[in-house]
Image: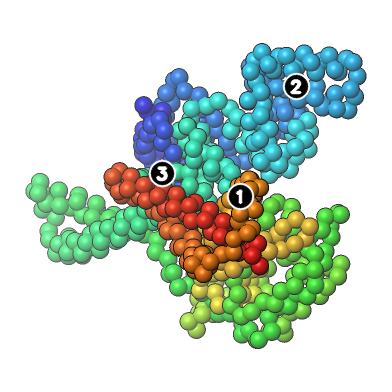
């Protein structure tokens, strides 16, 4: 069943063409990601689909009897209403009953008077009659997941990020068939993103989503449409499949361009040497010459993947943190934290919003003073600090190229060659034309990108980056990843982008409660796998403790035999192998490649491995208890 049909859609933004004569459709049950560079029309396309903008030409047809929900990229409501009223703005009896119940509950908690008691009882009866408890429970679960606790607070008192969360909760609670989301992971920490991706992956909805989070995209969507140079390209598969097919498409395009150039050279000689005969055949050949010329000079962007600037020499002493303590507003951020950084270290920092990740970076950069402890940096260290506050300029009436040239007109690269400031900007997406834009006219995302480039131009040997992936499109993220992969200094990165972290860091600090920091050697995916294993082990241990006293007595009396000792050692190796095997099958299933029969076999292999893992883990726990009791 077709939900959406877009036919021959075109849109200009001033003189700039966003897209021309694009067509696509979305059927019931499809979950599609829309990706494109920033500024190329993603949000405009979603606004047109939702009737918030009009195209210059073309038709958008939405099936008449379906309900749609739309999350815009920026939710800037100035309504003078509470969070509760914003989320439950429907006049349906169920939502009205929930709003009444939540309001009365708050009043009753403050003042348990007889009047409020009677209102409370009436509200409970209404909730019962309408069977609204399930919906109210779901609403509270989602609100809790996104840390929205004060539902009676005025929406105007919230930050931009909090308002976006409220809008997301509202659209998730709406009873819709077709969900359209524009950057839903913005302002969410990793735990929130993982909950949202699990929710959307199993939800029985049709989805069109713009996102730059490739991990999130892979978990939720099975198809990708890409808007590039005004055209639309469709890929039926996950992100890795998209990358593979895009490379093929570019290679084919380059082959066609080279072929057209060969024909163009031959035809140009004919045009120069042949009299302009007026035969029909000659006229057709002359007309075709212009088409060949157009094909021969199509521009295809190809980036240098070994792009890296020269870094300053780094000595043996890098950065030492000794017994660091810091408290902020009665919250313990760091408690007796120590660490010595080594050459070439690539470390990520993760944790909930408000856990102190940015504070930790500011302490290292000496923007904050610790309550106790010491931070000592090596004499050769040159920090490059990309902060969330952005680029500090005294004069914003300067052009991009002039700002960069004030720092350096030529940039020394890692291969000892030099690159002009203009070429450097162009590599990271500031076209030669856009380099003459004044700073004050840049978008928020463009300002963040310029701030990042200015940091990279400092030739640092220790890069500290606070959420460098915010507001960047997938192409810019790929460029940044390629650059950082060739960076030879130390990296310390705060990011909620798990794909970015997996690719760049070799260990992570996890900011925990009460100022504790866990240091895990491995990337984020490996850390999550370890957590899942620990949680599974904990559940199995709790299960084993429920055995009868008689059985516990028998286990305590029997010491493990030599054979059981060897079995225990073998099981440890087997469990590790099965965990890797399970992760391998899961990755293949998530990729979505292969025939239905191949995917069915993979699913069965995954299920068999999971079952085998449970059995062997249970036996390992049993032997572990026996060995522990005998010691």
Q: Earlier in the sequence, mark 1 or mark 2?
A: 2
Mark earlier in primary sequence (3, 1): 3
Sequence-wise first label, 3 or 2: 2
Which mark is on residue 551? 1
Q: Secondary structure at mark 3?
A: loop
Dot 1 surroundings within 10 Å: few (below 14), some, or many (20 or more)? few
Q: Residues within 10 Å of mark 3 (few under 14, many from 20)?
A: many
Residue at screen point 75% across, 62% down? 516
The residue positioned 20% from the left and 64% from the top of the image is 262
On residue 101, which mark appears? 2
**In the displayed structure, would residue 321 be above or below residue 22?**
below
Q: Quadrant of residue 182?
A: top right
Q: Is residue 541 above or below residue 157?
A: below
Tag of residue 361 = none
Q: Which mark is residue 222?
A: 3
Q: Are marks 1 and 2 in contact (CB under 8 Å)?
A: no
Q: Can you give x and y, in whole percent of width and height, for residue 290 in the image?
A: 24, 53
Instruction: From the viewer's side, name the closer residue of 459 and 34.
Output: 34
Say left or right for 488 vs 386: left
Would you place residue 43 above or below residue 218 in this image? above
Q: Nearer the viewer, mark 3 or mark 1?
A: 1
Q: Is residue 246 visible?
A: no
Question: Residue 174: which quarter of the image?
Answer: top right
Residue positioned 22% across, 61% down in the render: 259
Q: Residue 163 versus residue 515: which sits nearer the camera? A: 515
Residue 558: x, y in percent?
A: 59, 60
The residues tagged by marks 1 and 2 sit, at their Cα atoms, a distance apart of 50 Å
Q: Position of residue 118 (x, y in %)?
A: 83, 14
Picture quarter with the N terminus: top left
Real-space CA distance between mark 3 and mark 2, rounded to the nearest whole angstrom: 40 Å
């Amino acid at each position: 069943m077709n939900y959406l049909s877009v036919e021959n859609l075109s849109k200009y933004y001033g003189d700039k063409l966003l897209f021309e004569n694009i067509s696509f459709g979305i059927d019931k049950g499809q979950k599609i990601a829309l990706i494109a560079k920033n500024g190329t029309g993603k949000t405009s396309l979603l606004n047109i689909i939702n009737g918030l903008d009009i195209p210059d030409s073309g038709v958008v047809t939405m099936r008449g009897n379906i309900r749609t929900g739309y999350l815009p990229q920026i939710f800037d409501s100035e309504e003078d209403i509470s969070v509760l009223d914003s989320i439950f703005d429907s006049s349906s009896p169920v939502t009205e009953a929930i709003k009444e119940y939540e309001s009365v509950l708050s009043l009753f908690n403050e003042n348990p008077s007889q009047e409020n008691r009677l209102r409370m009882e009436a509200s409970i009866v209404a909730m019962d009659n309408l069977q609204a408890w399930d919906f109210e429970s779901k609403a509270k679960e989602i609100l809790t997941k996104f840390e929205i606790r004060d539902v009676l607070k005025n929406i105007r008192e919230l930050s931009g990020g909090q308002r976006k969360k409220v809008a997301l909760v509202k659209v998730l609670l709406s009873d819709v068939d077709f969900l359209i989301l524009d950057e839903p992971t913005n302002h969410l920490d990793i735990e929130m993103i993982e909950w949202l991706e699990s929710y959307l992956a199993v939800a029985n909805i049709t989805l069109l989503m713009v996102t730059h989070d490739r991990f999130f995209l892979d978990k939720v969507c099975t198809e990708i449409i890409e808007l590039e140079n005004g055209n639309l390209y469709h890929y039926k598969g996950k992100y890795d499949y998209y990358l593979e097919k895009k490379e093929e498409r570019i290679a084919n395009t380059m082959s066609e361009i080279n072929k057209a150039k060969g024909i163009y050279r031959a035809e140009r000689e004919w045009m120069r040497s042949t009299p302009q005969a007026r035969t029909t055949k000659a006229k057709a050949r002359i007309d075709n010459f212009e088409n060949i010329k157009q094909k021969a000079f199509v521009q295809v962007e190809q980036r240098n993947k070994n792009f890296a600037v020269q870094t300053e020499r780094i000595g043996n002493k890098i950065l030492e943190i000794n017994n660091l303590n810091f408290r902020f507003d009665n919250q313990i951020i760091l408690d007796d934290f120590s660490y010595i950084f080594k050459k070439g270290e690539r470390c990520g920092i993760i944790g909930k919003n408000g856990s102190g990740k940015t504070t930790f970076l500011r302490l290292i950069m000496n923007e904050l003073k610790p309550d106790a402890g010491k931070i000592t940096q090596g004499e050769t260290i040159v920090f490059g600090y990309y902060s969330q506050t952005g680029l500090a300029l005294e004069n914003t009436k300067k052009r991009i190229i002039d700002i960069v040239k004030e720092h350096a007109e030529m940039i020394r690269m890692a291969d000892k060659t030099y690159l002009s400031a203009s070429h450097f900007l162009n590599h990271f997406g500031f076209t030669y034309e856009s380099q003459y834009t004044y700073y004050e006219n840049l978008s928020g995302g463009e300002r963040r990108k310029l701030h990042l480039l200015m940091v990279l131009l400092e030739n640092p040997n220790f890069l500290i980056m606070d959420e460098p992936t915010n507001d960047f499109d997938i192409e810019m993220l790929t460029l940044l990843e390629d650059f950082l992969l060739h960076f030879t200094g130390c990296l310390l990165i705060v990011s909620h982008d798990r794909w970015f972290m997996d690719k760049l860091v070799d260990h992570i600090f996890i900011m925990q409660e009460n100022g504790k920091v866990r240091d895990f050697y491995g990337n984020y995916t490996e850390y999550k796998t370890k957590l899942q294993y620990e949680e599974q082990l904990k559940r199995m241990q709790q299960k084993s403790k429920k055995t009868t006293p008689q059985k516990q007595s028998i286990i305590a009396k029997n010491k493990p035999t030599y054979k059981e000792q060897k079995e225990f050692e073998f099981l440890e190796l087997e469990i590790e192998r099965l965990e890797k095997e399970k992760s391998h099958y899961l990755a293949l299933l998530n990729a979505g490649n292969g025939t239905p029969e191949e995917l069915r076999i993979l699913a069965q292999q995954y299920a068999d491995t999971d079952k085998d893992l449970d059995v062997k883990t249970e036996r390992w726990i049993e032997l572990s208890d026996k060995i522990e009791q005998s010691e």
